[in-house]
Amino acid sequence: MKTASLTIRLDKELSDLLAKASDQTGKNRSEIAREALRRQLRMTRFEELRKRIMPFAEARGLLTDEDVFSKIS
């Protein structure tokens, strides 16, 4: 698997939080950063898709998550 490198600057608070998470989980800092980035990118994609589909859902009277869940359960 081919990989790429990314260098980012962290303020002290974020660096400390990352170090603490690394100590607590036994994962290295890069692994935690990759997981966080992956999660954030998925959430961003989900939000984009949700914005695109909302007009279609609203036209069918689906205004809340509960409305959607009631239709699929």
Image (cartoon, grey):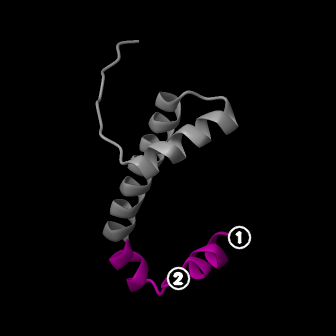
Local SS, label 2: loop
Q: Is residue 18 left or right of residue 7?
A: right
Q: Which residues are magenta?
A: 54-73
Where is residue 49 drawn, in percent x and y? 36, 61
Q: Residue at x 39, y 63 (%)?
A: 47
Q: Is residue 38 left or right of residue 6?
A: right
Local SS, label 1: loop
Which image quarter: residue 34? Answer: top left
Where is residue 8 drawn, in percent x and y? 30, 37
The amino acid type, in three-letter code, at marker 2 is Thr
Q: Residue at x 35, y 17 (%)?
A: 3
Q: Which quarter of the image is occupied by the N terminus?
A: top left
Chief SS of the magenta region: helix
Q: How many numbered dots are placed on residues in this image?
A: 2
Residue holding disc 2: 64
Residue holding disc 1: 73
The amino acid type, in three-letter code, at marker 1 is Ser
Q: Earlier in the sequence, mark 1 or mark 2?
A: 2
Where is residue 60 drawn, in percent x and y? 44, 83
